[in-house]
Structures are given as structure tokens and as C-alpha cells.
Image: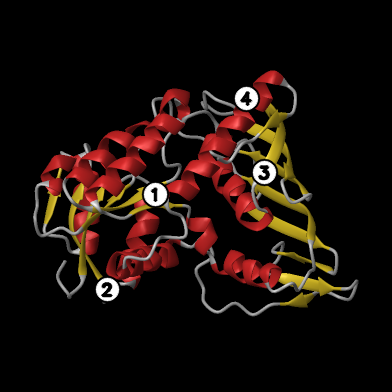
Amino acid sequence: MRSDRIRMGLIGCGGISRAHRDGYLALSDQVQVAATCDTQLELAEERRIELEADRAYRDYRDILDRKDIDAVDIMLPHDLHKEVTIAAAQAGKHILCEKPIASDETSAREMIEAANNAGVLLMIAYCERYGNAHQEMKRLVESGAVGDPFLLRIDHSQWVHMPAGHWINDPSKLGGGVVAGSGTHRLDLLRWFGGEVRRVAARFLHTGLTPLGGEDTAVISVEFAGGAIGEMVCTWSAQRAPWYETLMVHGSRGVVHNLDGVKISRNGGDFEGVSLSHDDPYGFREEIRHFLSCVRSGETPLTNGNEALKTLRLVNKVYEAANSECWIEVTNE
């Protein structure tokens, strides 16, 4: 790879690419988006103009054939991740792939193996680990500021009403419903803060308020291997409710939350606000910065393929628990 800016190709230019676009624009001293691609060429052309890329394509293989492109950012329906990731690895491109890594563990392992065999980096875009609030909360928890965590609570409330025919409404493409969509982010955060999960229980609802084919509402209970317990509540059918995402960690010496900014209470005292080092609430910019740094240094990404596989395994166990209506053991071998 050359010593100048890393040259990226964007594969998939739908809604989430707008958030990635802003990250690339903020990091233009480190990266140049050289090409864009989407089966709807007008979307690829829109991103091309915004990012001053060289070309817009319909076929992702046109990007992989270019020797001047170092890495790709894959932002496609979940069921297409495997095919394009393996092709990108075989073409020698480093890979940033939107979450989840895949819809099934076999596909995920094949993606990891392809990247390892090709000697390229595979990072999964669990952007919420990189957001400024979660980064600061993680620092506080790891520093022992709240003692030993014993209870974690994480919520996601959103109104997601995609038009009929959109891929998100198809469980075979999304991998399920809200849990496979946004819930995978929240379960990944629970793992990151609480450690590996020992067992899970879950209840799902399909309210029919949106065209979503899978579950639109879920309540999930987890028991962590370290002894703590946790709960996740998520919905894509929050009509007229604010979009909110919250995380609260209760420990033996205090509690930290991000209900209205990051705040911490120590030993039962009043909550104190915590200053954040930068403004990137959803983590897209810092996620891309981390990817670029790992490409240059060879460092293993925080959200590497193996980490993403563990989160996928947890997601799949949640679906198994919801279907069986009983507690399901989670193995992390």
C-alpha cells in the first residue's frame, strides 16, 4: 500500500452510506473515496459527487478489479455480506463491512477464513462501540469507577417504517427483525460492557404496525458468565415516540448512564456530568478512523471478525430462546 491517503471503494450507497460519507469527509486528510457502487447507479453517482470519487459503478466487481483501491466499505443487505466480502478478500482489499458480519455462523467463519488466507483486514462496523459516550462509559467501568458491575440495562426505541419491498422488511435478507437490525448493536454493547453471556431468554412481538416481516419488538434477559445480569428492550414500532438509545451500568460502588449525557454517581452520591472528548455520538467517524489506523499498522480491530462472530452467535441464541420460550445456554468457544 502506498504511503499517501488510503483509497477506498464504497459498495452499497443506500441510507447508511450517508453516515459513512460524513466520516470520510471528516477524515479527508487520511482517506480518499476513489469509487462508489450501487445497483441503483443514481445512488452511487450521488455518493461519488459528494465524496469527489473518480467513478460510480453498478457492479462491485468493477471496484475490486481496480489496483489503485486499497480497501472497501461494504454497506449491503445482510445476506450479501458473505459473497462480497470473500470476493474482496480474494482481490486483496482490506474490508470494512456493515454489521452484522453475516446471518449465519458458517458464512461468518468463511468470511473470516477468506480474510485470513488473503492477509487482509476484516473489520465489522459495530459503530456504537466507537461513539464518544460509550467510549467514555467503557473507560469509567474499566477504571473501577462504579465497582463490579452487577446489572446492565440497554434500550433502543425507534420508528422504522420502510416502504413495501425494502430489503429490511424481508427476514431472509435482514436475518430476522429488529433484533437482527438494531438489536445486534445493543447486544454487542452488552457483551463489550458485561463480558460473555452464559444464557439468554427472550420474548418477541410482531405488532404489524410497520411492513417489517420479522419481530418489531423484543425484551431480552441475559446472564453473564461473570455473574451479572442484564436486560435489553428494543422496538422499531415506537409511534410518535422519540428515537432514544440508552445504557445503564450498575456496580458495587456506583452507576453510570447516558440517559441525558454521560453521568456517574459514586457511592450513592449525586450524579455528575462527564465531559466527552469529541462529538461523534454514533461513532461513524471514529469507527472509520480506527479502520484506517488498523490498515496502516496491521493492528487487530476492536470489532474484528471473531468479535463479530461472538455477537452473531448471541443474536442467534436470542432467536432460539424466543422460539423455545425458555432459557438457552450460550457457548463462546
Q: CA distance from mark 1 to mark 4?
A: 28 Å
Mark 4, other Cα within 10 Å: few <14 / some 14–19 / many ≥20? some
Q: CA distance from mark 3 to mark 2?
A: 37 Å
Q: Amino acid at mark 2?
A: Gln
Q: Position of residue 142 (x, y in %)?
A: 67, 69
Q: Amino acid at mark 3?
A: Val
The residue singled out by tag 3 in the image is 197
The residue singled out by tag 1 in the image is 16
Q: Earlier in the sequence, mark 1 or mark 2?
A: 1
Q: Earlier in the sequence, mark 1 or mark 4?
A: 1
Tag 1, which secondary structure?
Answer: helix
Marks 3, 2: nearer the viewer: 3
Are dots 1 and 2 in contact, CB under 8 Å?
Answer: no
Q: Which mark is residue 332?
A: none
Marks 1, 3: nearer the viewer: 3
Q: Amino acid at mark 1?
A: Ile
Q: Which mark is residue 320?
A: 4
Are dots 1 and 3 in contact, CB under 8 Å?
Answer: no
Q: CA distance from mark 3 to mark 4?
A: 15 Å
Mark 3, other Cα within 10 Å: few <14 / some 14–19 / many ≥20? many
